[in-house]
Amino acid sequence: MESSHSSHTHQPRLVWHMTGIVAASIVITMSVAACNSSSPGKSQAAGTVVVPPSAQDLQQTVINVIKTVQPSVVEVRGQGNQGGSIGSGEILDSSGYIVTNDHVVAGLSIFAVQLSNGKQDPATLVGQDPQDDLAVLRIQESNLRPINIGDSGKVQVGEFTIAIGSPLGLNQSATLGIVSALDRTASEGQNGPATALVGLIQTSAPINPGNSGGALVDLQGNLIGVPTLAAANPESGSAANGIGFAIPSNRVKFVSDQLIKYGKLVNSGQGFLGIQSVDVTPDIAAAYNLPVKSGVLVSGFANDASGKSPAQTGGIKTGDIIIGVNGQAVGNSGDLASALLSQSPGTKVKITVARGSSQQTLTVTLGERPANAQG
């Protein structure tokens, strides 16, 4: 990430850090000149590298994608009373709308965008959605080249990915990787804008401070995600190499369309259970003599977008410990958010709870997550 409230140079302030190392390589065939025994003492020139046509085609494809996408990727800088930030963004249309991460602009008031040709423009903040960590800026330019937004629902593990942005302020940098996994859930921590981001694309393409808000594209040059987080090594606390996360392009489009039209998110489109909760740990279980050592303890209820709690309507009670959703184990609130936010409002889900010494499975119809709340 880019910002810290202490220095406000947008170093990682989240529980996930920006990092990565290129993890993709191409096997090539080496042709080495034979030793010349008749000419002892004379050095031989290094052999040439014979690159298979398929590798040449892949290399040229990567070059073409980067050249095509770079004009649609910008550098975003922000300034405020507590310092500044640097990040990246994508041009959404020719009229100057640009999407980036909310944590790149949060708490700041003056913004500037640098285009791929080096031209700098002042930008205005159109709208923010902290829970999705997305924001939209606008610059007064014409003849801009918008990025082509792909269908992240069709992304497959193993696809090549290219991340383009301004890591460490090095604008228009490109890194190569693959899609490592899909549907990841990550938290930006108690001090971060989003306590749970779901459906994330995991990639090995290196993501560093400044990449946030940039472009993760496929080999057709389609935007499939917005790089947002990189994992931290739980043992050392340092950035974990080659594990980065991007908000999927389908969610980016869903949110940015509303930010442009309304200036805020008015419809989350995400399922909502409507509880207040505490994660159960072995220590908490021992201290309060709970029947299970993990799960989500219901401590109260919260209203959905219509003003009611689907959990309470569905028979869940204060003191219940949620241990499963649709047969899948739930160990903490992150597991629960992943299971619920990926569902559409109106979906019926099976919630398994530990209630006293027994377990029960209840059917709950999910509501819609309010635009300013997690679920």
Image: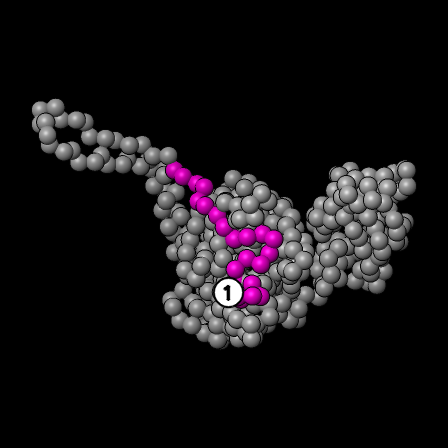
Image coordinates of residue 266 in percent, x first then y, are 71, 66
Q: Which residue is mark 1?
A: 9
232, 151: nearer the viewer: 232
Label total for image:
1
List the single residue furthest toward the front. 287
Q: In front here: 153 or 158?
A: 158
Percent position (x, y) of residue 317? 89, 50
Residue 374: image location, x then y, percent: 73, 57
Instruction: Specify whether 91 is left or right of 351.
Output: left
Instruction: Compare residues 20 and 176 and report the one nearer the observer.
Output: 20
Q: Quadrant of the N terminus?
A: bottom right
Q: Which quadrant does the C terminus fall into?
A: bottom right
Which residue lies at the image location 79% right of the left edge and 39% below the top edge? 293
Q: Residue furthest left?
A: 39
Q: Which residues are magenta?
A: 4-26
Q: Is residue 68 visible?
A: no
- Evaluate whether residue 29 shows in this view: yes
Of the residues shown, which amino acid type is indicated by label 1? Thr
Q: Residue furthest top?
A: 37
Categorize mark 1 by other alpha carbons within 10 Å: few (<14), some (14-19), many (20+).
Answer: many
**Would you say 127 lies left or right of 285 here?**
left
Q: Is residue 40 left or right of residue 142?
A: left
Q: Which of the colour schemes (rainbow, by chain, secondary structure, one colour) is used?
A: one colour
The residue depicted at 67 percent of the width and 58 percent of the height is 190
Query: For residue 226, what is the image quadrant?
Result: bottom right
| Helix, strand or loop for disc 1 | loop
Q: Main secondary structure of the magenta part?
A: loop
Identified at 14% across, 33% down, the residue is 43
